[in-house]
């Protein structure tokens, strides 16, 4: 019975890995982003400026995620999210907690590549590709044991949609992507 329970725990951990891996690398969510309340938006002088702002936002968000995995309450990664990205983060945290799992370790942003800028939309949107190195991030059970499935990819590509809210860009959606650079 112990073998079966241990096997079931590993199977359960593997089944939750999709949620955990996404949460570990970006705490992402898929689906359409909820529209934020319209406010005056940040004006970008160029695509390059918009991409730079998006990369800075994502780096700050990733740093906040690393801080949360280190047990720090601030900065809060949810401060960088809205819409489906925020909903996905909340859901992932709840599923991890209910399963007795937690995430440890760092995730590093290896690449940000701007894809598109739409300044004429209301609110303005920026889309970029991020490549994340999650090789140092692990899933731990309630005993602190590493239950990260060995077949988990160490690099993850995501398409990230940012929405201008006031003078800030917030992450509205993240979707897994395939990119040979990741």
Image: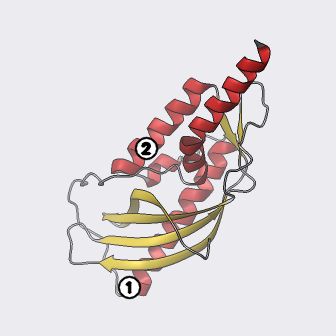
Q: Quadrant of residue 40?
A: bottom left
Query: Is residue 139 positioned above or below 163 on the image?
Result: above
Q: Which residue lies under the disc numbered 2?
A: 88
Q: Are marks 2 and 1 in contact (CB under 8 Å)?
A: no
Task: State the separation of the CA atoms marked 2 and 1.
Answer: 28 Å
Q: Residue at x 39, y 52 (%)?
A: 30
The local crowd at label 1, few if under 14, some if 14 to 19, many if 20 or more residues have their Cα within 10 Å, is: some
Q: Residue at x 26, y 78 (%)?
A: 119
Scheme of image coloration: secondary structure
Side of 91 where 131 appears, left or right: right
Residue 78 % position (x, y)? 47, 47
Q: How many marks?
A: 2
Q: Quadrant of the C terminus?
A: bottom right
Element on which disc 1 rests: helix
Residue 99 % position (x, y)? 59, 26
Side of 102 where 59 appears, left or right: left
Q: Which residue lies under the disc numbered 1?
A: 47
């Amino acid at each position: 019975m112990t073998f079966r329970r241990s096997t079931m725990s590993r199977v359960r951990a593997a089944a939750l890995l999709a949620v955990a891996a996404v949460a570990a690398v970006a705490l992402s969510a898929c689906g359409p982003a909820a529209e934020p309340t319209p406010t005056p938006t940040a004006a970008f002088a160029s695509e390059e400026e918009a991409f730079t702002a998006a990369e800075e936002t994502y780096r700050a968000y990733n740093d906040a995620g690393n801080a949360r995995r280190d047990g720090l309450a601030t900065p809060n990664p949810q401060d960088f999210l809205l819409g489906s990205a925020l909903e996905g983060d909340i859901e992932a945290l709840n599923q991890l907690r209910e399963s007795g799992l937690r995430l440890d370790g760092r995730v590093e942003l290896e690449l940000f590549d701007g894809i598109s800028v739409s300044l004429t939309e209301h609110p303005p949107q920026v889309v970029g590709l991020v490549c994340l190195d999650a090789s140092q991030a692990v899933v731990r059970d309630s005993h602190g044991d590493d239950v990260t499935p060995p077949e988990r990819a160490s690099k993850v590509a995501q398409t990230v949609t940012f929405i201008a809210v006031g003078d800030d860009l917030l992450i509205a959606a993240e979707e897994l992507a395939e990119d040979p650079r990741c």
